[in-house]
Image (cartoon, helix red, strand yellow):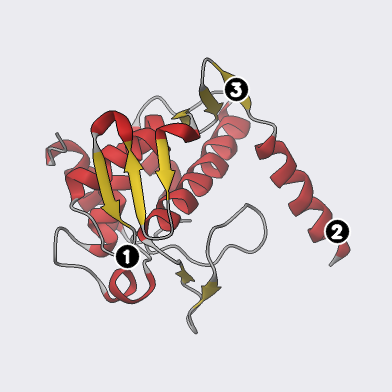
Amino acid sequence: MMKKSWLSLIFISLIAVAFVRNGSEETAAGRVMASQQIRCTQDSLFIDSLNLRLPLQEIPTVRQMHAVAKYRIGRWAKVFTVIKLQESGADGQYSYLAREFNNLTGMRMPRGLRPTTAVAATKTNYAIFANWYDCMVDFGHYLEFTVNGFSNKFGREPKDEYELINYMFGSYNPYSTWKRDVFWLLKNYRFE
């Protein structure tokens, strides 16, 4: 148990020591805009440059969520958005996990290998989030962890979203229909 605590502490410390350059944070998951670009209050999220205000307890539209993901997740924002669509549905057609637990991406509760913004777990070990943005931040942590794993294995970052999804397939979701549907969304869904 002590070894797990040390490993978790070291991993969290490594993430905390991310490179800061020109007002933005550079991570393995991609370029993330500086935190002053996104401001959260008790009940709302603001992106000043987009003149956007979103309530934290109401799931925004896919287009709004993708706009926030571009700021928060950076390079892999489209991966977050298509997995959100696949796992919890489109505007107003949300899954039970999304409606009840703000879990937009079907995330399981991590086992201490990476940081998480989850506040608890369901009886079936799905992560519970305080709001939709915390789920996005958590998925960003997951992507960073995954891209680091890819880089360690292949000595480079994934060249595109398809290569990252191929790498995630099996560990994130083992069903071939999931992968087929996510690829279809990557190719056909228009976010702008």
From the top left corner, tell me how far across and down residue 39 is, in percent: 42, 42
Q: Does dot 1 land on a helix, a strand or a loop?
A: loop
Residue 12 location in percent, x, y? 70, 46
The secondary element bearing badge 2 is classed as helix
The type of residue carrying mark 2 is: Lys
- Dividing the picture into quadrants, the one containing residue 69 is top left
Quadrant of the image for the N terminus?
bottom right
The residue type indicated by label 3 comes to Val
- From the viewer's perspective, is the residue at label 3 or at label 2 nearer? 3
Task: Report the residue marked by disc 1.
Answer: 57
In this rendering, is residue 125 above or below 64?
A: below
Quadrant of residue 93 within the rendered picture: bottom left
Check the image and report above or below for 160 versus 122: above
Q: Nearer the viewer, mark 1 or mark 2?
A: 1
Which is more foreground, mark 3 or mark 1?
1
Q: Which residue is mark 3?
A: 20
Distance between mark 3 and mark 2 Cα atoms: 30 Å
Q: Position of residue 182 (x, y in %)?
A: 25, 49
**Outermost residue, right side:** 2
Q: Are marks 3 and 1 in contact (CB under 8 Å)?
A: no
CA gap, disc 1 and disc 2:
37 Å
Measure the alpha-carbon separation of dots 3 and 1: 30 Å
